[in-house]
Image: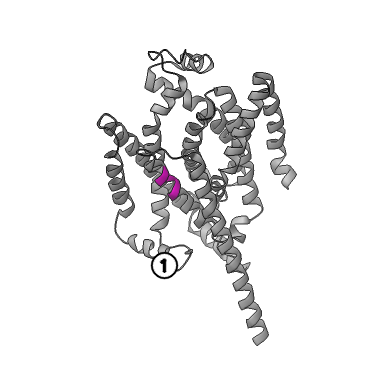
Amino acid sequence: MIVRVFGLSVAITVVSLVVAFLYGGWNGLFICTILAILEISLSFDNAVMNATVLERMSAFWQKIFLTIGVLIAVFGMRILFPLAIVWATAGLNPGQALDLALNPPDPETPANPSYETIMLEAHPQIAALGGMFLLLIFLDYAFDADREFWGRFVERRLAALGRIKYAAVIIALAILLVASMVVDDDQRATVLTAGLIGMIGYLTISGLTSLFDTTEVGHEVAEATEQAAAGQGGRSKPVVVVGKAAFMLFLYLEMLDASFSFDGVVGAFAITSDPILIALGLGFIGAMFVRSMTVYLVRAGTLAQYRYLENGAHWAIGALAAILLVSLAVEVSEVVSGLVGIGFIGAALISSVRANRAERRAEQALDSAR
């Protein structure tokens, strides 16, 4: 299964590295390799979170995610997104933005800002939009009382807040208001607007997904799936959705992946502003491996085997949302956000192993007593 899942990613990696060498020589190969390593090593929490959504989708929609979804991730987020930022911020059309990226102006000429400078100046909008989208994902999870809790105290107390109507939206708006106050006056309206767009995007997709989930799947399918999982002695498996519900989950998954990519795309400009190398390293190599890891987690049943991985992924999302919003006032390295995410995933994995061992010991003790 490993060869089948990761084979294409490995092949694309080899081709991308060859192209990077032909394009930029040894320096281009080195930069592309560094970008790919950073994207892969810092995106494991992205893969885990993607897997929690992908396992609810049918085989057909999983294939869509691996084809159309890859094109969106590679060309949309890693190539078109930076060009769109330059177009919106500097008033340059995509062709001019690409020319600016490939032919940077003289650094001693302040009248002509570089592609990298324009991207970095757009960071407040990117951080606010992505941060608020991810924050609502985390808050909806944290306030949900109908799930398995990780630990004895924090998650149970957070879930108790979910009894307050619209708690997630209220807290998110309050945090956005505070975040807008830490930026300069000329950026405040921009941050507020971008943050509200992120919230509206999440609430719209989440609301439509829930609506179609109910109308398309039906209670009979949900009950049958839960009974099958219970009969196997495992944890309840998610209901696989189809039709409009699956399409909305696909959109949700792409928005989620884009939000995870914001800091990586912007952070890549600390290494290089060359859009070709960024596309090769982050897109063709990094995005493909993230998707392969996602599919492997689903097909290997890792989420069912390690019960707290989904919890850890949501906490990693909450940490990334906080880091994006904090970065409005203080510069935060993308390495920090990646390490925090890995830390939550690692802690959840250890907790899952311990819980599984304790469960097996209890079963053995019960069998011995019989």
Is residue 145 highlighted in magenta?
A: no
Name above or below for residue 3 compared with residue 276.
Answer: below
Q: Is residue 349 left or right of residue 325?
A: right
Q: Residue at x 41, y 20 (%)?
A: 87
Q: Quadrant of residue 72?
A: top right
The image's colouring method is one colour
Name above or below for residue 149 compared with residue 31.
Answer: below
- Residue 370 in view in this figure: no
Instruction: Answer few, some or many: residues within 10 Å of disc 1's Cα (few below 14, many 20 plus, some between 14 and 19).
Output: few
Name the one closer to the observer, 222 or 24. 24
Give the x, y percent position of residue 228.
60, 64
Main SS class of the magenta portion in the image: helix
Give the x, y percent position of residue 78.
53, 29
Kindly identify which residue carries mark 1: 153
Farthest residue toward the left?
185
Give the x, y percent position of residue 145.
41, 63
- For the C terminus, give its image quadrant: bottom right
Q: Which residues are magenta?
A: 318-323
Q: Is residue 303 left or right of residue 317?
A: right
Name above or below for residue 151 compared with residue 190.
Answer: below
Q: Residue at x 35, y 40 (%)?
A: 200
